Image: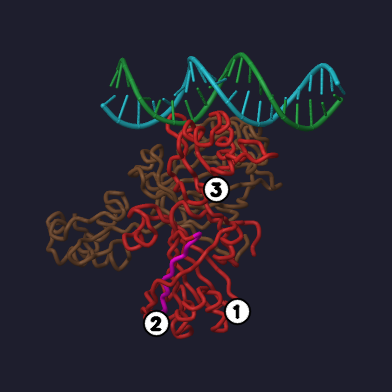
Chain colours: A brown, B red, C green, D cyan
Amino acid sequence: MRRAGVVLWRQIEKEIERDIDAGLFASGSRLPVESELATRFGVNRHTVRQALAALQERGRIRIQQGRGMFVHRPMIDYPIGPGTRFSANIERQRMTSSGRLVDASTIAASRQLAEDLALDVGAPCLVINDLREIDGVPVAISSRHFPAARFTGLDLCFEKTGSISQALAAFGVHEFHRTWSRIHAEHCAVADSAMLRLPSGAPVLVVESLNVDAKGTPIEYDVSRSVGGAFQLLIDHTTPS
Amino acid sequence: MRRAGVVLWRQIEKEIERDIDAGLFASGSRLPVESELATRFGVNRHTVRQALAALQERGRIRIQQGRGMFVHRPMIDYPIGPGTRFSANIERQRMTSSGRLVDASTIAASRQLAEDLALDVGAPCLVINDLREIDGVPVAISSRHFPAARFTGLDLCFEKTGSISQALAAFGVHEFHRTWSRIHAEHCAVADSAMLRLPSGAPVLVVESLNVDAKGTPIEYDVSRSVGGAFQLLIDHTTPS
DNA sequence: CACCATTTGTTCGTATGTATA
DNA sequence: GTATACATACGAACAAATGGT
């Protein structure tokens, strides 16, 4: 197990970090106590301590004397602006992201939805719910609303490609950008708690947004609910684009 | 009681709305059942229903068959951009806002804080904690960090005026703007739960931001924790200013 | 699982006032 | 003035959803 050329505590540091990344320890949860880790890795307690100190230095865990060690999964930076794309944001941070279709249906536009998508009240809207995962862990549920008249069959296209951008391209929309975002926090609805693997009542970050095509016509109204500590939205007020 | 010239159900709608605004029913709490309201107002159940339907249409209550009717205090729209100011945002929506100093202290800049405020690590920083209230209800706690070297005494100035803008003006800063914002959701810390009158664990919206003066020098790093359903941040991606 | 009470939703019918042609 | 259409208001009964026993 022990690789040559790399000091022991570095190997242990990497191994613990892998466990954290794999979701073996939830963010905020307690790590096993030092002595337990020492026996697991078959080394002295001092050796584990060196690894743990390094992890704390890099902000991966928080050590509190007398209480324990708590894993600290750093939030994923998520810049939002006109050109926001999910996968690109995540993959820039060396993580794998995937979207999975949960269900699709057609509803009649409510007053608010009609206003956002510039439709008549009651106009048919295609709703696609998809679950976004990062490194295999579900982090967000997205409810995407499209004018059904223009995008019938988009759900099938999305299911095949797994990407909204590609699905939209199949409908002739090669370019689109975000015009506004609305953000608030609420507690997780029971319906979502199962899919996001959260206790009902846990905080979720809700981001609503509107995408328009190159001509400025609204094409997608999106409500995305993400796990509380998963994302940190970044907004740069200096650059317009 | 019945005014002439205004139809009955409109009068009842207004009266119920007044009760909600007066805080007679807390946000999320159940309204009396239809029959009870009908007898209270001395009208038929249909008449109350019309009033209630109108209130739901305007988003003031949420009606659920079999469960009841629940008051829904709408989120306060809070546009964020370079020129974001708290009081101006709130007072635009016909509410009274006030800031109250909780405490002030001087700390040494951490690595992150030093980076944000363009200071050396360990440089003294003035921290002002203030509680923001709307219509007398606490909605947010702000932790404002200033370079102590430039702004010693700012806390006293803030305590007197109750406004950061005015306090800064006294220090020769008449113009400042926000360069970036970082946003995430987490659950309420025990320390804050008392002041925000929240159950510990309730969702809070955390907004970090950096203000710079006219020359682009960082003057204030701010962490604001607001009650989950209180605010809806609005971001307009089309206008840079 | 069935059963029940509570509460909102829906659909009849009836009567009245008001605006319009 | 009359006829028509529409919104308002009341009454009674039943349907449907919810939550608990």
Q: Disc number at residue A21?
A: none
Could you tell me which secondary element the residue under label 2 belongs to?
A: strand
Q: Quadrant of the C terminus of chain B?
A: bottom right
Q: Nearer the viewer, residue B90 or B18?
A: B18
Q: Residues within 10 Å of mark 3 (few under 14, many from 20)?
A: few
The chain containing the residue under callout 2 comes to: B
Rendered view: B202 above or below B163 = above
Relative horizontal placement of residue A71, taking residue D9 as reference (left or right): left
Discs 2 and 3 carry the same chain letter: yes
Looking at the rendered structure, the kind of residue marked 2 is Pro
Looking at the rendered structure, the kind of residue marked 3 is Arg
Could you tell me which secondary element the residue under label 1 belongs to?
A: loop
User: Dot 1 corresponds to which residue?
Assistant: B174
In primary-sequence order, the first of circles 1 and 3 is 3
Q: Position of residue A175 (x, y in %)?
A: 64, 47
User: Dot 3 corresponds to which residue?
Assistant: B18
Q: Quadrant of the N terminus of chain B?
A: top right
Asked whether disc 1 touches disc 3, contact meaning CB atoms under 8 Å apart, the reply is: no
Discs 2 and 1 carry the same chain letter: yes
Q: Position of residue A142 (x, y in %)?
A: 49, 42
In this rendering, which labeled residue sits more in front, label 1 or label 3? 3
Q: CA distance from mark 2 to mark 3?
A: 49 Å
User: Dot 2 corresponds to which residue?
Assistant: B124
Q: CA distance from mark 2 to mark 1?
A: 23 Å
Q: Is residue A121 visible?
A: yes
- Main SS, magenta region, reads strand
Q: Is residue A6 visible?
A: no
Q: CA distance from mark 1 to mark 3?
A: 40 Å
Which stretch did the figure color magenta?
Answer: B124-135
Q: Nearer the viewer, residue A46 or A193?
A: A193
Q: State yes or no: residue A80 in magenta.
A: no
